[in-house]
Structures are given as C-alpha cells and as structure tokens.
Image: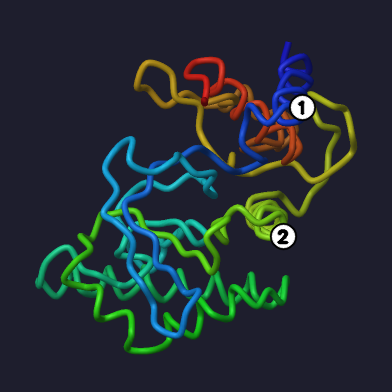
C-alpha cells in the first residue's frame, strides 16, 4: 500500500498538484521586496488576498530554545525572519534572537551551496539595520518571505527546493544504512520524519516502537522499519494531500 502511495505522489507532483518534496502550501502575510535600492514591504495580506505559496516545511514543535531552533528556509514568522520578539520580556527577546540567528545561518548555508545572487541580497538586508524599519509593522507570528522580482518568490526557485531537501536529509537521515521497507533500496533511513501526518487535527506516527520486545537485535528508533528519506517524505505528503487536497 505504501509503495502505491509513493507512485501516486510521483504522479501528483508531475502534474503540479502537490508541492515539491519537503514543501507545503502556505499563506503569507508579508513580502519584503528587495528588487530595488530600498527594501519595500508588501502587505499585510489577509486570506485570499495573495496566492498560497509553496514553502519549505519540516517538523517543529516544543519550546524555542538553544537546543530546539528549527527555522524554515526563507518563509517563516517574524521572530525568525527579523528577530521580532513577542513582547519585551528578556526570555522572549532571547528567543527571538536565537530564532533569527539560526534563520540567518540557514540562509548562509544555502548561499554557500547555491551561490544564488538572490540569497546574497537577502543576507545583506538581514545583516543591516534596514530590517528594523519594519519592526513596528510586522507582528511576531506574521509569516514573512522575500522576493527580488515580481514574477516569483525566492523560496520557490528550483535551486532552493533542491537545497532544502539535501539539508533536511543530511540532518534527519541515519549514518547507518538498511533496505527501505517501501522501495527496497539500500540507503540511509530516516531517524526523524521530516514532517508529520495530520488527520482530524491529530498528529499521527507512521512507525512507532514503544515496547522493548519490538526492538529486536538491538535496533532502535526507525531502524526496525527503515524507510529512506524520499519515501518517508512522499508518504507523509501524500497522506496529507488525500486528507486535505491542495488546490
């Protein structure tokens, strides 16, 4: 059954009915336009006022801390994108600083891998004081992204899509290899799934081993039912698509 889901996902992606791997449809509130000499803020966009974009996604939960900072590449809330704190409490200010630092670091990594001029413009903006002019307009939880031309957003560029998959696979895949339970290819298996299945508002787990009896031959976590990164991601994506088809 899971293999048939993978085949369905491949068909849907080729027909542009599903977003690329490790992407999802998302509503945004603001676009920071870097096409001219001076950054320009577009928005706020309410539901229906701007198209749903294809944006990088990954699992992210729990309290934001030094050990739990997981930015989305180029499309995130203003805490990450600009470092806007939720309030003036020292704790919230520190959280926003951590989120922003890791967000910038991720874009630096993407720039090192892609050498895209668009990312250099984003970094120049984020590393300047120009971003502070937007602090009073954008709320901490508003979703923000960037563009350098009117036709497209940077996050939707094929090079960015490819980098995001490689980045997550490197972070989430095991150093060990096994035969994938779906495609049977011998490859690193995922330790942590890139995203989650959401059904009726509940987060569902594709594989789970909660008893010692199931941890045979010393295998732990997902090694008992190894799934390669691509199969794991496509399976979750198509489950979510079938529950709530993207338009």
Decide: few, some or many residues near mark 2? Use Cα within 10 Å; few <14, some 14-19, many ≥20.
Answer: some
Image coordinates for residue 125, horizontal then vertical, percent: 44, 82
What's the distance in space between the residues labelled 2 and 1, CA to CA? 19 Å
Q: Nearer the viewer, residue 210 or 83?
A: 83
Q: Which badge, 2 or 1, comes first in the chain's sequence?
A: 1
Q: Quadrant of residue 20?
A: top right
Rendering coords of residue 157 (x, y %): 65, 56
Q: Secondary structure at mark 1?
A: helix
Q: Given the current orientation, which residue lies at the most extreme bottom position?
A: 128
Q: Nearer the viewer, residue 74 or 94?
A: 74
The residue at the point 58 percent across, 24 percent down is: 206
Tell me residue 137's x, y (percent).
Answer: 19, 66
In this view, the residue farthest toward the top is 1
Q: Residues within 10 Å of mark 1 (few under 14, many from 20)?
A: some
Residue located 17% across and 63% down the image: 86
> Vertically, is 187 above or below 150?
above
Secondary structure beneath label 2 = helix
Instruction: Give the labeled residue for mark 2.
Output: 159
Residue 230: quarter of image: top right
Residue 51 to residue 43: above or below? above
Front-lying residue, 125 or 237: 125
Where residue 10 is drawn, which disc sits there? 1
């Amino acid at each position: 059954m899971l293999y048939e889901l993978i085949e369905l996902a491949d068909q849907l992606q080729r027909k542009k009915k599903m977003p690329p791997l490790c992407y999802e449809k998302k509503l945004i509130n603001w676009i920071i336009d870097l096409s001219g000499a001076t950054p320009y803020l577009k928005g706020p966009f309410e539901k229906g006022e701007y198209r749903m974009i294809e944006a990088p996604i990954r699992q992210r939960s729990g309290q934001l801390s030094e050990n739990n900072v997981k930015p989305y590449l180029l499309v995130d809330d203003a805490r990450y994108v600009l470092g806007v704190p939720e309030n003036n409490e020292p704790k919230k200010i520190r959280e926003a600083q951590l989120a922003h630092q890791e967000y910038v670091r991720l874009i630096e990594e993407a720039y090192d891998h892609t050498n895209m001029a668009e990312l250099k413009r984003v970094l120049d903006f984020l590393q300047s004081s120009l971003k502070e002019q937007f602090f009073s307009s954008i709320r901490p939880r508003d979703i923000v992204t960037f563009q350098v031309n009117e036709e497209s957003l940077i996050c939707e560029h094929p090079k960015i899509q490819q980098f995001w998959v490689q980045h997550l696979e490197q972070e989430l895949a095991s150093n060990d290899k096994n035969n994938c339970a779906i495609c049977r290819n011998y490859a690193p298996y995922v330790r942590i799934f890139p995203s989650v299945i959401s059904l009726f508002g509940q987060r569902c787990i594709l594989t789970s081993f909660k008893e010692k009896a199931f941890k045979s031959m010393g295998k732990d976590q997902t090694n008992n039912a190894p799934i390669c990164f691509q199969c794991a991601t496509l399976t979750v994506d198509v489950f979510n698509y079938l529950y709530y088809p993207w338009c």
